[in-house]
Image: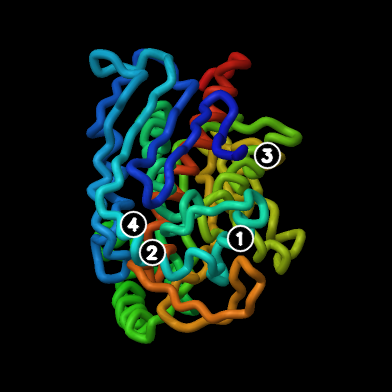
Amino acid sequence: MAGNSFGTLFRFTTWGESHGPAIGVVVDGVPPRIPLAESDIQHWLDRRRPGQSRYTTQRREPDEVKILSGVFEGQTTGTPIQLLIENVDQRSKDYRNIADRFRPGHADYTYWKKYGIRDYRGGGRASARETASRVAAGAVARKVLGSTISIRGALVQIGPHTIGRKTWDWTAVEENPFWCPDRKMAARWAEYLDGVRKAGSSAGAVIEIVASGVPAGLGEPVYDKLDGDLASAMMTINAVKGVEIGAGMAAAALSGEENPDEIRIKDGKPVFLSNNAGGILGGISTGQEIVVRFAVKPTSSIPKPMRTIDSEGHEVEIETHGRHDPCVGIRAVPVGEAMMAVVLADHLLRYRAIGGAV
């Protein structure tokens, strides 16, 4: 199976299945002599870990990471870093009734058509479980980026309910189970998702990731644009169906006078008067905040009968059991942050490779 690696200079490869003995990642291209310990990675894995509220899957995985290579005496050596995360709470029996049936909205049918075999236990490689490996890689990427670059994510929409931009408060994000920057909307989401969960249904979401402190000059035109790589990175996250940068789709409704981010000089430095471009022009960072949003579809695993077919071509019904997220977008926030981190780390190293000053 190709397509398990991402990046150019900062490159990582994830491995493992949802219900296998372990999952993990190999991170290559990390410069030597960067301080790195398991605790640096564990902090970010704990934010993604399942079972932390009634609004996420109740699968209980500690997600304890082990560094197997690439670190000596607390510092990176410049060699590949291998990270291991054991699976300890698999319930494969929950999936035996779908071994020969394809769940609508899942990758069951496409994996089977491509490979002639599929791991039906929780979706195998197509499971959201794989994203823990990305978060681990993102933790390493943050160490490469250093403390001057900050990456934060928030949930801005669940189902039809969108936050109020005027009441955005980053401190609120850590105070509720939804990563919501709008306290009033977080309370509304709780009521809404309780109803969704009790009805045996699910809801989609929109996540916004913001990177601050990114220097101008990152990005490789024409075909390795920074925004192109960010869009690619977010689209590789399970269940993501759309990505936008800055104003995104809303830019189509702006006029030629409204859309450009005009520039002035303040204290001898350029200052942009708006950020419709999301911090990227011509595929290269401007020095402004980089703003990316992505949409996550509703979880397809719901305990209601749905029409499908089996591997013999028969029309059948399927009812999915097991432990699933009523809104998988909630746990996608740390994953989006991680993918932002790996793309920025990759382009930072590429910029330094051509003699860039940052």
Q: Quickly name the residue at label 3.
A: 283
Amino acid type at circle 1 is Gly
Q: Is residue 14 left or right of residue 132?
A: right
Asked if the residues shown at circle 2 and circle 3 are in contact, with their CB atoms under 8 angstroms apart, the answer is: no
Per the rendering, the mark at residue 126 is none
Q: Is residue 233 above or below residue 184?
A: above
Q: Considering the numbered disc 3 on the image, is that residue within a helix, a strand or a loop?
A: loop
Q: Quickly name the residue at label 2.
A: 168
Query: Where in the figure is residue 133, as x and y percent of width and height?
Result: 40, 41
Q: Is residue 97 left or right of residue 93?
A: right
User: Which is more toward the observer, 338 or 197?
Assistant: 197
Q: Considering the numbered disc 1 on the image, is that residue within a helix, a strand or a loop?
A: strand
Q: Is residue 244 above or below residue 131?
A: below
Query: Where in the figure is residue 352, as x and y percent of width and height?
Result: 55, 18
The image quarter containing residue 109 is bottom right
Q: Quickly name the residue at label 1.
A: 242
Per the rendering, the mark at residue 170 is 4
Q: Earlier in the sequence, mark 3 or mark 1?
A: 1
Instruction: Name the residue furthest front.
Output: 312
Q: Earlier in the sequence, mark 1 or mark 2?
A: 2
Cα–Cα span, label 4 and label 2: 7 Å
Q: Nearer the viewer, mark 2 or mark 3?
A: 3
